[in-house]
Amino acid sequence: MADALLTRDSVLRGIDANIQSDTDMLRVIVEKRNQLKDLAQTCIDLEDPDKVARFRELFKELLSMEHEVNMHTQALQTMKGTYQPANESSDFKGLLDKKIKALLQSHRFEPEAANELKDFDAGTGGGVAADDDVVEDGAGDLPYDRCPLTGKSVFDLEDPVADQKGVIYEKAVVVDYIKKKLRAGHDAVCPVAGARHVLIMTNLTKPTALERAKRRQMLNKGNAAAQQENVYDADDA
């Protein structure tokens, strides 16, 4: 009987130690999440949306890790409340792993739906855009041939970027537009007349449609020059 009590007490102390380790790990994860959020906001000020996007992915990984640690803690607490010493030694780790697996299956976690990620996005202009009015980028046609913020031809922009709908902007100008809207507590709605989508910092990408259009433009100019040269040759003949 005494041996059984001793075994039970030692197991319970081991469980408590593991729960404390989980608590310490969760505290570190939360600290790292806050640091990533601060770094992402700094990158917005530095106009570096690519780094903001990378920090967002790291933030999601930390959220998933936090969920797994919480499930580990919950499994330990459940086993602590139900543990009874057996005459034969039991596979405690195997039972714990089985309990954690069951919890992860019954409490599935989607980082994109987490309130913490929404808070991250609210402060950085990140996130996933709604899938309405998407401009397809397959034919290489440009939805708009001018930056709606500067009025310049997209072919004359120094550092063009495209939003999630394919609208092309001067990078410095659109980043400044998004930052001003965020600071004022408003959504940075696309300035194109009739547009409803919100501009998202991390969705500003290299405008591949514009790259293709420039290549076609150069090719057409080359073909026109070649045709003109052929005309001159014919006249000379």
Image (cartoon, rainbow, N blue to C red):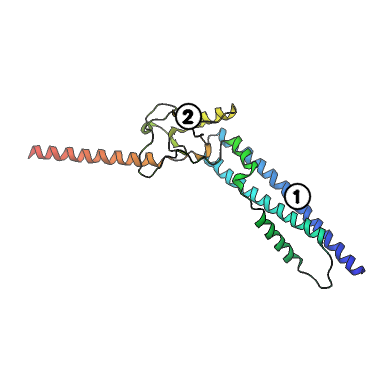
- Eyeballing the image, is 51 above or below 77? above
Q: Nearer the viewer, residue 2 or 159?
A: 2
Q: Which residue extends farthest left?
A: 237
Specify the quadrant of the image occupied by residue 157.
Answer: top left
Q: Which residue is mark 1?
A: 24
Q: Which residue is mark 2?
A: 173
Q: Which residue extends farthest right?
A: 2
Earlier in the chain: of badge 2 and badge 1, it is 1
- Eyeballing the image, is 165 above or below 3? above
**Image coordinates for residue 124, horizontal then vertical, percent:** 58, 36
Q: Badge 2, how many Cα within 10 Å: few under 14, some, many 20+?
A: some
Q: Is residue 31 visible?
A: yes
Q: Nearer the viewer, residue 120 or 31?
A: 120
| Residues marked 2 and 1 touching at CB (< 8 Å) | no
| Residue under the image location 92 percent in, 69 percent down | 1
Amino acid type, callout 1: Asp
**Image coordinates for residue 94, horizontal then vertical, percent:** 72, 66
| Residue under the image location 57 percent in, 37 percent down | 43
Quadrant, the C terminus: top left
Q: Mark 2 and mark 1: span between their CA atoms?
A: 44 Å
Q: Which residue extends farthest bottom?
A: 88
**Image coordinates for residue 169, horizontal then vertical, percent:** 44, 32
* Image-based side of 82 in relation to 136, left or right: right
* Image-based side of 40 in relation to 84, left or right: left
| Residue under the image location 63 percent in, 44 percent down | 114
